[in-house]
Amino acid sequence: MLFASSVKNSVIAAMQQLYKVKADVNDITVQPTRKEFEGDLTVVVFPLAKSAGKSPQDVGAEIGNYLSEHAAEVS
């Protein structure tokens, strides 16, 4: 899916910008959002949180804000 690939690349940029961590595309999991939640795709942040040294909640919020501001495909 092209959209998921674009989101993964934006998450890589976010990890570098926010945490000075070089993430690999294979480190990032994007999956369809469960129907009880809003949105099309979900970025699994648990592995990223360990690299960032923060809680999954903080990393999810910070990456979400970054994507909203810097990734045209994310709203």
Image: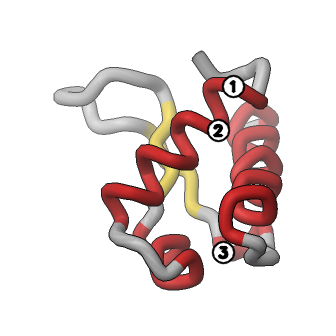
Label 2: which secondary element: helix
Q: Which residue is mark 1?
A: 69
Q: Position of residue 29 (x, y in %)?
A: 57, 61
To which residue does mark 3 refer?
27
Q: Quadrant of residue 68?
A: top right
Give the percent coordinates (x, y) of residue 5: 78, 45
Residue 45 in the image: state x and y as whole percent.
46, 62
Looking at the rendered image, the disc whose residue lies closer to the viewer, 3 or 2, is: 2
Question: How far is disc 3 from disc 2 in space, using C-alphas?
Answer: 18 Å
Closer-to-camera residue (49/25): 49
Name the residue: 58% across, 16% down. 75
Cα distance, mark 1 to mark 3?
22 Å
Badge 2 vs badge 1, beta-carbon distance below 8 Å = yes
Which amino acid type is marked by label 1? Glu
Residue appearing at x 32%, y 57% in the figure: 57
Amino acid of disc 3? Asp
Horizontally, is 37 left or right of 27 in the view? left
Residues 22 and 1: in front is 22
Q: Residue at x 66, y 75 (%)?
A: 27
**CB of mark 3 within 8 Å of CB of mark 2?**
no
Q: Is residue 5 above or below residue 22?
A: above
The quadrant in which residue 13 appears is bottom right
Question: What residue sits right under mark 2 in the picture?
Answer: 66
